[in-house]
Image: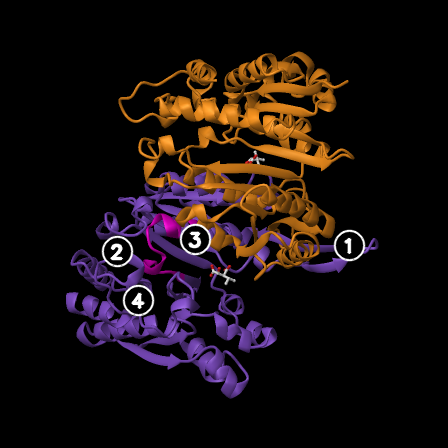
Chain colours: A purple, B orange
Amino acid sequence: SNMIKVAVVGGEGIGPEVTDQSHRILKWFSARRGIPVALREAQYGLIPYLATGKVLPDDTVEAMEEADAILWGATGGPETTEVPPAARKAGSLLSLRSKYDLYANLRPIVANPALADSAPLKAAVLKDVDFIIIRELTSGIYFGEPRGIETLPDGQRRGFNTQQYTTSQIRRVARTAFELARTRKGRVCSVDKANVLETSVLWREEVTALHEAEFSDVELTHLYVDNAAMQIVRAPSQFDVMVTCNIFGDILSDCAAMASGSLGMLPSVSLGPPDRLGRRKALYEPVHGSAPDIAGKGIANPLGSILSVAMMLRITLNRPDDAMLLEKAVDTALAAGARTADIAEPGAKRLSTQEMGDAVLNAL
Amino acid sequence: SNMIKVAVVGGEGIGPEVTDQSHRILKWFSARRGIPVALREAQYGLIPYLATGKVLPDDTVEAMEEADAILWGATGGPETTEVPPAARKAGSLLSLRSKYDLYANLRPIVANPALADSAPLKAAVLKDVDFIIIRELTSGIYFGEPRGIETLPDGQRRGFNTQQYTTSQIRRVARTAFELARTRKGRVCSVDKANVLETSVLWREEVTALHEAEFSDVELTHLYVDNAAMQIVRAPSQFDVMVTCNIFGDILSDCAAMASGSLGMLPSVSLGPPDRLGRRKALYEPVHGSAPDIAGKGIANPLGSILSVAMMLRITLNRPDDAMLLEKAVDTALAAGARTADIAEPGAKRLSTQEMGDAVLNAL
Ligand SMILES: CC(C)[C@H](C(=O)O)[C@@H](O)C(=O)O
Ligand SMILES: CC(C)[C@H](C(=O)O)[C@@H](O)C(=O)O
């Protein structure tokens, strides 16, 4: 069929609350802008665990399996203590990334001008920040073997993990970066620690080789990861597309998230390999986690999830104009003063999660 | 003898320029405050390489070997291309850290109030920031074996490194952190990635065990490294002492350096194991590197090196009052408007490296 299949999985913590709002927005686009999507809701976490013994029950697996795109909320939080670690692991985010080979994690870091003078974090909000971090998501030290904790002959213990990358693992994520740069400002910054690590030496060589062979029209620079962390804080507007390995991407994207002013507003997508038609399985998710401290209160910021829908419109649904329409609606709502608690100046009116969803819908 | 031996090694890039100023300051303390130090100057880098074939000539090795403390400038920069990698490696900072077992790298992150309203980075300068990052410096993925790049049967290449920690490697650096916290606000935050890495699981267990056994008077918290990067940017004043592994410390300390407002002002020390009297071999060095773009111009900020002397006064020379005297002199100079180019507001007078040294000496 021509229907594009989307699984909607709110998950745990504030995940369901924020996903309710992005789900409404997605339905608006489907109905009003004639986008042929088949939405299927599915559960994840403690509730299905109590009913079926699995955090990721068969129905959810099926929904995710057949989906072109997954709209994901969040996982983790206090519920985790009620689910035994083994059951938790069987359906973890890490195992899903691996299962669907979602090797390219894209995190746009955009500082919204409407927030520059008002966010609690205004000191850190800089205008003109607009870059994307591409984090390799299915290899590196997260998955490398051997790994473990052993007891040494002298009774001490030793923990060990393996950081590793192969030619193809490096090249495919670098390709995603170069291709994306061509649709933006044409610049890729590759981040490694090639002055210390062999994995980084290989990373740099392979990125450079791919660049020379196929992407010499794109500007390529290299930074050491310590310097990259510093530059992200010091002058984030210098970047266009940054590409790095799994663990460095984990750290740098959270560091950059703060530089943008509010974690609650940041979307992300994790992409699998392209099929013959160039379509890639995609998991869209706000960067913020399950935020157990505010879960269930209806005050979480849904914009990270809503802007993830904008990414879905652009990438999976191939509707760049609709993506821009949604991004503009978010800008309009913010410019008109719509603020959830996390981005509200002291004393200002704070919208609920639902009201922020309304504000965006009204601006559409 | 009762003389404390200090090797002064300016090194490369701006290293010699800034070390000239901290050296003057150290001599002032020696002469005026009666501190029994024997200062021995030694060279490092391209100049000795051209004369002897070694970046670290025998004379310098001897000076560093016999020293209680080393006042180090910087290494690296364009000179590096004139020294073959093998010769460079033989005397590298990594090999020195390993040779002298300098396992605890302390980096104070202090935002100077005088800069809060004037630094080019004022957006990022926050008052009340005063913490120390302790980075494990001689183990982890920097030194772990096996490591290398291999060619696979299918012609692809694979790069690999080993992250590893043993009980004793973790406990000794954690001990440094707990002991330091007792002299400060009594709080240690240990940073790891225990939700993914076995090395981090062991790290957390060993830190916790040492805490329970000997330091339960100190408050201990744990953060995942991605969250720590975020918190350092978002709210750095929450921290007192942070302790983490080699690679995480490398990234977080540079991230934090920026949060403090100016890299040029930050000191550091790397400490070896205590001897029977509790004395530890120490290498003091500004956090900034060789800064080849401004080397030789006489405009570098010497305060990172000068404040490293303050750390030397406190730690190796056991003169806390003199350390405070020097830190106050730096504050006084800054409060009176002394600024090198890196911390000057646009249009303001910029002092040379030498003039900044004068300003601090005058304030003493
Ligand atoms: C929860 C954790 C395993 C995960 C990661 O490190 O990848 C998270 O930090 C993220 O960035 O999505
Ligand atoms: C030059 C490099 C090997 C070094 C490191 O990574 O340790 C540097 O970044 C530092 O932090 O001292």
**Residue placed under numbered mark 2 in the picture:** A346
Q: Which of marks 1 and 2 is in front?
A: 2
Please tell me how crowded label 3 is: few (under 14), some (14-19), or many (20+) other residues with Cα within 10 Å. Answer: many
Q: In which quarter of the image is the C terminus of chain A?
A: bottom left
Please tell me how crowded label 1 is: few (under 14), some (14-19), or many (20+) other residues with Cα within 10 Å. Answer: few
- Tell me which corner region of the image, top left, top right, bottom left or bottom right, holds residue A27: bottom left
Which residue type does callout 3 highlight? Answer: Asp
Taking the view exactly as shown, the residue that stands out farthest to the bottom is A51
Looking at the image, is mark 2 or mark 3 earlier in the sequence?
3
Residue A129: percent from left, percent from top: 30, 46
Q: Which mark is residue A254?
A: 3
Question: Element type at marker 3?
Answer: helix
Name the subunit of mark 2.
A
Name the subunit of mark 3.
A
**Residue placed under numbered mark 4 in the picture:** A302
Question: Where A244 falls versus B348 (above or below)?
Answer: below
Per the model, the C-alpha gap separating discs 1 and 2 is: 52 Å
Question: Element type at marker 1?
Answer: loop
Q: Residue A156 carries which label?
A: 1
Q: Tell me if residue B325 is in the magenta stretch.
A: no
In the rendered structure, which segment of residues is drawn in magenta? A255-269
Name the subunit of mark 1.
A
